[in-house]
Amino acid sequence: MIRGLVFDFDGLILDTELPVYQAWAEIYQRHGLELSAEFWTTIIGRGSDYFDPVADLEQRLGLELDREAIQAARRTREMEMVMDLRVMPGVNEWRQQATAMGVGMGVASSSSRRWVVGHLERLALDGFSCIRCGDDVERAKPAPDLYLAVLECMGVAAHEAVAVEDSGSGVRAAKAAGLHCVAVPSSMTAGHDFAPADLILGSLAEVSFREVVARLG
C-alpha cells in the first residue's frame, strides 16, 4: 500500500535547472570563460556543496573575486527567468489525486529551504506535510539522507512511498532509501542514468498517480 508521495523540486515541480545554469553561464561569459552545459548536467541534484562556481572562477582566473557581488547578480538574473516558469505538467494533477487517495505528500530537495519553500509559497503549492532540504541534512543526494528524513517526518515506511525525481543522483538517493522511484528527466538531465528507477516517464501528465500506484502495487 502506498501512503506517501515525495517530490523533488528543481526540474520536477519547476524546471529551474536551465535558468540556474544560464545565470551562471552568463557570469562565466562576462569573465571570458565558458561553463559547459555538459559539465553542469553532472552536478545537477547534488546540492550546493558539491561544486562552487565562484571558487572555480577564481581558480581559473587566478584572482580573487567579489563573491557577494557575483552571487547577487546571479540571484537577480536567475529570478528573472524563474518567475516566468509554470508548474511542470502533471504535478498539480498528481497532488490532487494523492490528496483524494489519502496519500501524504512531501518534498526532498538538495536546494536550500529558502529557495524551495519560497517558490512553493509563491505558487500556492500547499499540502506538503514534510519538506526536507539540503540545509536540513548532512549529506545531499545521491546520499539517502533527505529521503530518510522525509520518511521519518511522514511516519511512512520506505516501501510505502513513491519518490518522483528528475536527476540520476536523485533516483539513486531515493532507491538507496528504499522508496519506489519514478524518473521524469528534465530539459537538463535527459542524459543521466535512470536505470535504477522503477518507472521512467516523459512527463507526469503521461500517467496518473493512481495508475502508477496500481503498477507499483
Image (cartoon, rainbow, N blue to C red):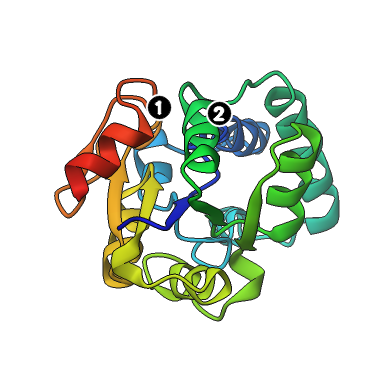
Considering every residue shown, the one lying at the far bottom of the view is 138
Residue 43 screen position, x and y as percent? 42, 53
Q: Residue at position x 58%, y 34% from top?
A: 16
Considering every residue shown, the one lying at the far front of the view is 101
- Foreground: disc 2 or disc 1: 2
Mark 2 → mark 1, Cα distance in angstroms: 19 Å
Which mark identifies residue 187? Answer: 1
Task: Please give left or right for residue 133 compared with residue 143 in the image.
Answer: right
Determine whether 31 is above or below 57 in the image. above
Corner quadrant of residue 170: bottom left
Task: Please give left or right for residue 212 compared with residue 53 in the image.
Answer: left
Q: Secondary structure at mark 1?
A: loop
Corner quadrant of residue 112: bottom right
Which mark identifies residue 73? Answer: none
Q: Secondary structure at mark 2?
A: helix
Task: Please give left or right for residue 114 compared with residue 156 in the image.
Answer: right
Q: Residue at position x 38%, y 46% from top?
A: 165
Task: Please give left or right for residue 82 compared with residue 122 in the image.
Answer: left
Determine whether 89 is above or below 51 in the image. above
Marked residue nearer the N-terminal end (2 or 1) = 2
Mark 2 is surrounded, within 10 Å at the Cα level, by few (under 14), some (14 to 19) or many (20 or more) other residues, namely: some
Q: Residue at position x 39%, y 46% from top?
A: 164
Mark 1 is surrounded, within 10 Å at the Cα level, by few (under 14), some (14 to 19) or many (20 or more) other residues, namely: some
Comparing 207 with 201, the one in front is 207
Residue 122 screen position, x and y as percent? 80, 35
Q: Which residue is mark 2?
A: 92
